[in-house]
Amino acid sequence: MKRIAIVGCGKISSIYFKNSCELFPQMTVTACADLDQERAAAYARDYPHVTATSLEAILADPAIDIVLNLTPPASHYAVARQVVAAGKSVYNEKPLTITREEGQALLAQARQTGVLVGSAPDTFLGGGIQTCLQLIQEGAIGEPVGAQAFMLSRGPEGWHPDPAFFYQTGSGPLFDMGPYYLTTLVALLGPVRRVTGSARISFPTRTIGSEPKRGQKINVNVFTHSTGVLEFAGGAIGAITTSFDVWGSSMPRRIEIFGSEATLSVPDPNTFRGPVGILRAGRKEWEDVDIARSYTDNSRGLGLADMAAALEKGRPHRANGELAFHVLDIMHAIHDASAQGRHIELASTCDRPAALPANLEPGEID
Ligand SMILES: NC(=O)c1ccc[n+]([C@@H]2O[C@H](COP(=O)([O-])OP(=O)(O)OC[C@H]3O[C@@H](n4cnc5c(N)ncnc54)[C@H](O)[C@@H]3O)[C@@H](O)[C@H]2O)c1
């Protein structure tokens, strides 16, 4: 069993604590840290086997195998590089890092040190998207022709307790939500070869609507509406629109994949569940597809558990740094294409992560 330390005990951390301690036997949380020490202390009270401590103490503790980095994007690289330098594996929330240079440096440093880098999202390992992968691998949609993805919203400042980071470099709708959609597309269709796109800022300031910062203004420093065109190495053509500028839309927060033999309706990639639908060639009615794979509840931490098992067994892990870096490269390329008015050839690529085995019991991975 691998011992995990969680760094960053904010909004998303509770589901990771719960699943790491209660669902996955491959790992357990033994320590946590946050710049706000009371946040870490609260978890130590809830989970008696967890010690609230500092990042420095975690780095110096030889009993800790993996650091789960749940800090905001601006701290992803700064924390992760220290973890790798300390000889430990690291699993970052998304995006992997802010810049391509940081991502490349982190992966190179990890290769040199002989540790693993993993990254959210891991929703592509959920039952809904794994069912889609099975259908594609069985040839149910024929040859993939295209894909369309939508994430249209009015932004997170109405619900997140500290939403300013969503409008700073490293976040925005593409870097915050794009990883779910792009990681799913790469897991289902393989790597992307070249990209073009357009992006804009529609509202230069935002007003926080949630407590405790209600009424405070946020200056917007990132694109808040963008569309990217993706040419996959396998030949399919995809498009992704992500927005924090849209009041409402009838476009579903889903992905559709168009194949030579059928259209596949892929569930919201920010969830682990279905539904999955298929419209076969020549038919008028969509068929509901039974979810044939495990992990349909909120299983955040599944990718981390897979990495813990991979460390134990010396096999590759699925939510890995190369995949996350390719997704980061795609996101930057959409914005670069917009600025430069041209297609951008991607220098990065990655392997399609292996499907999870079928019929897994809760907590099981191999
Ligand atoms: N909130 C969500 O619904 C959600 C969902 C999925 C992924 N994420 C991702 O999770 C990450 C964190 O998001 P969040 O919503 O939990 O943010 P948050 O602001 O609620 O929490 C971040 C925490 O990290 C701490 N922190 C910041 N820098 C630190 C450092 N250098 N060392 C130690 N602690 C530090 C902060 O004090 C804070 O408690 C982001 O990368 C985000 O993209 C968030």
Image (spheres, helix red, strand yellow):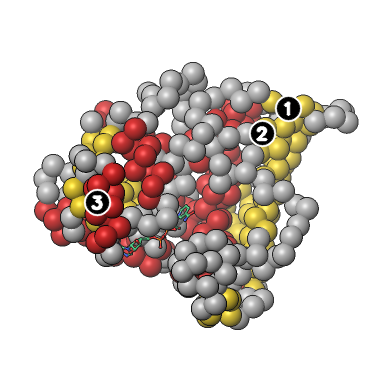
State which quarter of the image contains the N terminus.
top left
Q: Quadrant of residue 272?
A: top right
Residue marked by disc 3: 32
State which quarter of the image contains the C terminus.
top left
The reply to whether the residue tagged 1 has its Cβ within 8 angstroms of ligand 1 is no
Residue 215 image position (x, y, % from top left):
54, 77
* Cβ–Cβ under 8 Å for marks 2 and 3: no
Q: Quadrant of residue 8?
A: bottom left
Q: Residue at image x 58%, y 49%?
A: 181
Crowding at dot 3, Cα within 10 Å, few <14 / some 14-19 / many 20+, comes out as many
Residue 258 image position (x, y, % from top left):
73, 40
Q: Nearer the viewer, mark 2 or mark 3?
A: 3
Residue marked by disc 2: 275
> The residue under label 1 is which amino acid type?
Asp
Give the mark, 2 or 3, whose residue is nearer the N terminus: 3
Give the mark, 1 or 3, whose residue is nearer the N terminus: 3
| Image-quarter location of ligand 1 | bottom left
> The residue under label 3 is which amino acid type?
Cys
Q: Residue at image x 41%, y 44%?
A: 15
